[in-house]
Amino acid sequence: MANAVPGTRFAVASRTLLPGDTIGAGDVRVVQAAVGESSERYLVEGETTVGMTVTETVAAGELVPRRTMTSGTDNGLARIVISAGGSAPAGIAAGTRVDLWRAAEPDLDVDAAPLVSGATIASVDVSSGLTGADDARTVEVIIPEDDVAAVITAQSTRGGITVVQSAGAER
């Protein structure tokens, strides 16, 4: 499929697709594009996408890279909701890559420590308190299944979890 002509029809994400999402009929649409020699990297019209599982974030409007889809449903990922309080960076949204840290507890002589590197934000919920300030924030994150126990344990401590946008993360 090298050197695609302007009439090549590619699959494009209709919404932001997150790791672990199973593709439904309305999640991908088809557009014409000319992407030159890199055309073999993307799914084209007629290739099966419905029922496939997303392995990495694809923003709404992006061509769907082949590497971001798998036919398996067991991708080793889990979604978990955590309370980030005021620790979540402003501007994070679905698809943003973040790192999760166990917060320090100085009175217990416990230092901050990394929990999960490169988690993906699935959703953010900000509630306003009596002052009108954003003072309660929960985030749903997509993390490796192997990290779930450590995140739950850290969430149950007084220090909780700190959410930090991953270095170089754009979304």
Image: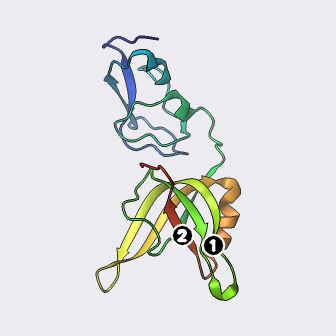
Measured Cα–Cα span from mark 1 to mark 2: 9 Å
Please state the horizontal and vertical placement of residue 87, each as a whole percent of the image: 47, 72
Q: Which disc is residue 60 wearing?
A: none
Please state the horizontal and vertical placement of residue 131, each as a whole percent of the image: 30, 85
Q: The residue tagged with tag 2: helix, strand or loop?
A: strand
Please state the horizontal and vertical placement of residue 21, each as a whole percent of the image: 51, 44
- The residue identified by callout 1 is 112
Q: Nearer the viewer, residue 82 or 4?
A: 4
Disc 2 crowd rating (10 Å Cα; few below 14, some 14-19, many 20+) is many
Residue 52 visible in the snapshot: no
Sequence-first disc among 1 and 2: 1
Question: So how many labels did they put on this image?
Answer: 2
Residue 4 sits in quarter: top left
Q: Which of 87 and 134 is in front in this view?
A: 87
Q: What residue type is labelled 2?
A: Thr
Residue at the bottom extreme, as displayed:
107
Whether residues under marks 1 and 2 lie with C-beta atoms below 8 angstroms apart, the answer is: yes
- Judged left or right of residue 106, residue 135 is left
Residue 97's place in the image compared with 158, above or below, is above
Residue 134 sits in quarter: bottom left
- Judged left or right of residue 67, residue 171 is left
- Identify which residue is drawn at 61% across, 77% down: 104
Residue 122 visible in the snapshot: yes
Please state the horizontal and vertical placement of residue 135, each as a whole percent of the image: 39, 78
Residue 150's place in the image compared with 135, above or below, is above
Q: The residue tagged with tag 1: helix, strand or loop?
A: loop
Q: Nearer the viewer, residue 148 or 5?
A: 5
- The residue identified by callout 2 is 162
Residue 8 sits in quarter: top left
Q: Which of 170 and 75 is in front in this view?
A: 170
Q: Which amino acid does label 1 sit on?
A: Ala
